[in-house]
Image (spheres, helix red, strand yellow):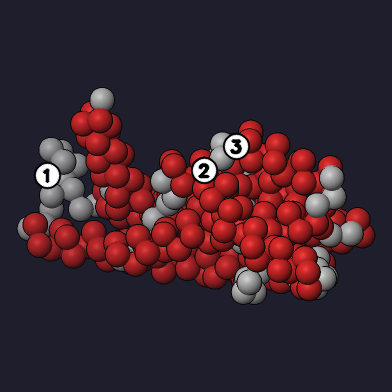
Amino acid sequence: MTTQSPPRIDTPYGPDAEKQHLEQGIGKVRAGRIDAAAARLVAARAQLYRSGDGAPVYAREEMREREAALLARFDADVQPTLTEAAREIAEAERVVMLQAGADPLFALPTDDLTRAAALLPFVVQDVATLGTSELLARTQAMIDRRDRVGMVTLQRALQARAAEIDARIRRRSVARGGAVSATAAESTILAAIRGPFQLLTDALVGPTARATRAEAVADATRARLIQGRARKTRAQLDGSEARDLDHYRRQMRGVL
């Protein structure tokens, strides 16, 4: 069984999470930078169209060039904020690993390591197929019977699933030449993973580490929400969000 990199700290999304983390303190400051950069782009874009009839001021090719320049300016404006967020996430993940002590996998006796390696393929399959409530129930049952091998194995499988989705999102970002958001299906999977992963982490670490870990998780949550705000704002500004939604609707009409 191979060693995993520091676990991705799963992040709650939605209005409640944004209200908690992006409407106060440093989160509010960073979100404000993104919103201000977007407002500047919108104001500058308005100057590309005549006020009377809304017709473009410039020829088509020049309009494309000017639009691209506005988006590049937005990217440059938000990059320092994204760099801060990435640094904060990396530090939070480092703290989580340190507070958890040695990797729980390598705290297992040799016989248990063998059992964990044998279990892992089946647990990975369960993570991919079980519903949210079933996964939570399976997790709680392992914790209740103090099945440390099962807990460590399930935690690894959850990490692998989250990493797989993250890699998929990154590949799309590379293919499209810019940041993209998780699809609705991917967000649902990550949300289903988050609860069991949190329960397992709490069960596998000591109580003294939990307060520090909670602070690190809060830092990472705020940083990931900032990244999400930047991606969503960029997608709204360049039109990709609307195009993706239209594509999804056409697909659904074909299914239905």
Q: Report how far apart the C-alphas of labels 3 and 1 lie in the structure.
A: 51 Å
Q: Is residue 190 above or below residue 157?
A: above
Residue at image point 76% right, 41% down: 140
Give the total number of marks visible in the rendering.
3
Nearest the camera: 193 or 236?
193
Nearest the camera: 86 or 211?
211
Q: Secondary structure at mark 3?
A: helix
Badge 3 vs badge 1, beta-carbon distance below 8 Å: no
Given the image, on which type of amino acid does mark 3 rest? Thr
Residue at image point 64% right, 62% down: 118
Front position among marks 3 and 1: 3
Q: Residue furthest top?
A: 256
Q: Secondary structure at mark 2?
A: helix
Given the image, on which type of amino acid does mark 1 rest? Ala
Image coords of residue 60 (percent x, y): 9, 57
Give the number of the disc on residue 55. 1
Mark with earlier residue (2, 1): 1
Horizontally, is 151 left or right of 246 in the view? right
Q: Secondary structure at mark 1?
A: loop
Give the residue number, with chain letter if any, for mark 3. 132
Given the image, on which type of amino acid does mark 2 rest? Thr
Give the residue number, with chain letter if any, for mark 2. 129
| Snapshot quadrant of residue 249 | top left
Image coords of residue 218 (percent x, y): 72, 54
